[in-house]
Image (cartoon, grey):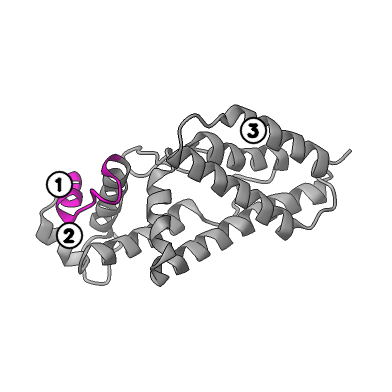
Amino acid sequence: MDRAHDGEPTDTRERIMVACLRVLDTHGYAGLSIGRIADEADLSKSSVYHFFDDKDDLLVSFLDYMLDRFVGPLDESFGDDPEADLWVHLDFALFGATGDVVPPTPGGFEPGSGEPFVELRSQAVHDETYRSRFTTIDENLQARLAGIIRNGIEDGTFRAVEPEATAELLLTVMLGGLFRRATADGVDTDAVRREVERVVDATLLAD
């Protein structure tokens, strides 16, 4: 079994990360505590403190976990149908979890609401550590979208657009969708989806 630097099994750290995600999803950032995370992970508080100095230390590690697990590079599961691959990502932002783009955590939990992501991201306004992590997350997502677009250009699905610039625009649309779903009621995501589809058809899809 792989082990963490302090000699403990790495699956204990994973249990803490999954528990952190569940507590965030249920109670929000304001309700997050080491005690609640320990209870959710079925561990003692001292076990959690064995790995992390405090809540902030845990949350920074949690962002690294999210980056590693959910925002990885384009892999072999994408590439056969660039248009479908693109919509997997856009629809995730507009409608929520899908196993195609966000694999479930151990135990089958899917962070589909977007609320944990939005709540943690708000801390980046004043905290440089959070800002650095979310900058990296954005860069990885932008590179992933650019890879899909590049695949589509190569196989004739998409026009010869600038992949990085187009990916930046689509990422901004995706983040807007996540933020609106998490922070406002009555958002007509179906209407937004139709408009985004119209733009994609007019400016990205090859004739």
* Location of mark 1 (residue): 39
Query: Which of the two residues, 68 or 97, is positioned nearer the viewer here?
Result: 97
Q: Which x, y percent locates residue 75?
A: 59, 52
Q: Is-magenta flag for residue 36?
A: yes
Residue 101 can be seen in this image? no
| First-in-chain label (3 vs 2) | 2
| First-in-chain label (1 vs 3) | 1
* Marks 3 and 2 close (CB-CB < 8 Å): no
Q: Main secondary structure of the magenta part?
A: helix
User: What residue is rendered at 20% in x and 66% in y?
Assistant: 54
Q: Which x, y percent locates residue 61?
A: 33, 63
Q: Is-magenta flag for residue 179?
A: no
> On residue 48, which mark appears?
2
Mark 2: secondary structure: helix
Mark 3: secondary structure: helix
User: What residue is rendered at 71% in x and 43% in y?
Assistant: 82
Q: CA distance from mark 1 to mark 3?
A: 39 Å
* Location of mark 3 (residue): 193
Q: Which x, y percent locates residue 172?
A: 61, 51
Amino acid type, label 2: Val
Magenta part of the protein: which range?
Answer: 26-41
Query: Which of the two residues, 131 or 61, is positioned nearer the viewer here?
Result: 131
User: What residue is rendered at 45% in x and 66% in y?
Assistant: 131
Residue 59's image quarter? bottom left
How many numbered discs sit on the rendered protein?
3
Name the quadrant of the C terminus: top right
Residue 2 can be seen in this image? yes
